[in-house]
Amino acid sequence: MAKSIFFFDFDNTLYSHQSKRIPPSALESLETLKRQGHVVVLISGRGNESLPLFQSEFVCLPDTVCLLNGQIIYHQGKLVFERRLPDLDTQALFNRAKERDIVYGGYNFQGLVISGVNNRVRTVWQDFQGDIPLVKPGFEAADPVYQACLYITEKEQPLFAGMLEEYVTNWSHPYLCNLISKKAGKSVAIGWCLRYFGIDAENAYAFGDGYNDMDMLAAVPHGIAMENGFDPLKEIAEYVAPAPDRDGIQRALQHYRFL
C-alpha cells in the first residue's frame, strides 16, 4: 500500500465536545495508520495554548501539528513553519476598531489575547463554555500577530470597508469574526506537508467539520466531513462520516479500506 497522509481537525472531528474526549475508536485508528507507515497530521484552528490539551488527549501526539489554521507548524516538537499577519495591516485594522469602540483580539505565540471586555465578549465565551481570554490592551504593539479577530456581526462589516477584503473571514459566533491572511489557511499547511514528506496529493485525506476546513477539503482529492459539521462543507466532501461519538473516524477509514 502506498504511503498516504491524513489531516485531522481537532474540535468536533477527533475531539467530541459532547463526551469531552477523543473516542477510543479514533485513537486506535490513528495508531493503526501510523503502524502502517502513513503520516498522521493534527491540523487545528487552535493555538499554542492548546498544546497541553492535545498532549493529554492523545496516546501519542502526532509528529506533525499545524496550529492557527496552518500558520504555525511543528514537526517532532520543533517549529518548522510560521506565517504572521503583516504589522501594518493589523495596526490599521485595530486602529479602526479602537475608533469605533470595538473589542478586537489576536493570537500571538502564547495564545489568544483581547483588547478589552464588553457584553459581546462575555456572551461569546459563555456560549463557547470557555474562559474569557487574557485582556491586554495594546498587545499588538508588543507581539507579532498570527490571526486576528473582531467582536462584530456580519452586518457590521461596512465599518471596516476596504480592510476585511485583505483577509479570509469567518464567523465562529454571531458576535465574533476571525481573520487570517489570504496567504495562509489549512490548505497552505497541507501543501507544505506534501512537499516535506514527498507524498503525492492523490494520497492525501482530510477530515473536518467547520468553516475553516473548507479550503482544506478543497485542497485534497479525499475530503471527509463529519455529519455534525457545517452543511456547505458536507456539500464539497467526497464522503460524510458519522459524528465523532458514533465512531466516525474509524468508520470513514474502514470505508476507504485502511482498517
Image (cartoon, rainbow, N blue to C red):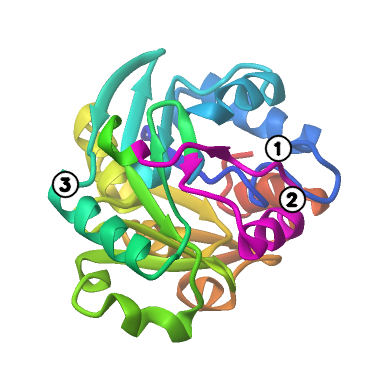
Badge nearest the viewer, 3 or 1: 3
Query: CA–CA distance between discs 2 and 3?
Result: 37 Å
Q: x and y percent of residue 224 in the render?
A: 53, 59
Query: CA–CA distance between discs 3 and 1?
Result: 38 Å
Residue under numbered circle 3: 86
Q: Are marks 2 and 1 in contact (CB under 8 Å)?
A: yes
The answer to whether one can see residue 97 in this image is: yes
The answer to whether one can see residue 238 in this image is: no
Q: Residue lying furthest top in this view?
A: 77
Q: x and y percent of residue 36 in the render?
A: 51, 24
Residue under numbered circle 2: 244
Residue under numbered circle 1: 26
Query: CA–CA distance between discs 2 and 1?
Result: 8 Å
Q: Is residue 20 left or right of residue 196?
A: right
Badge 3: few (under 14), some or many (20 or more) residues near its Cα, within 10 Å?
few
State whether residue 168 is above or below residue 61: below
Measuring 61% from the left and 20% from the top, which residue is drawn there?
52
Badge 1: few (under 14), some or many (20 or more) residues near its Cα, within 10 Å?
many
Which quadrant of the view contains residue 27?
A: top right
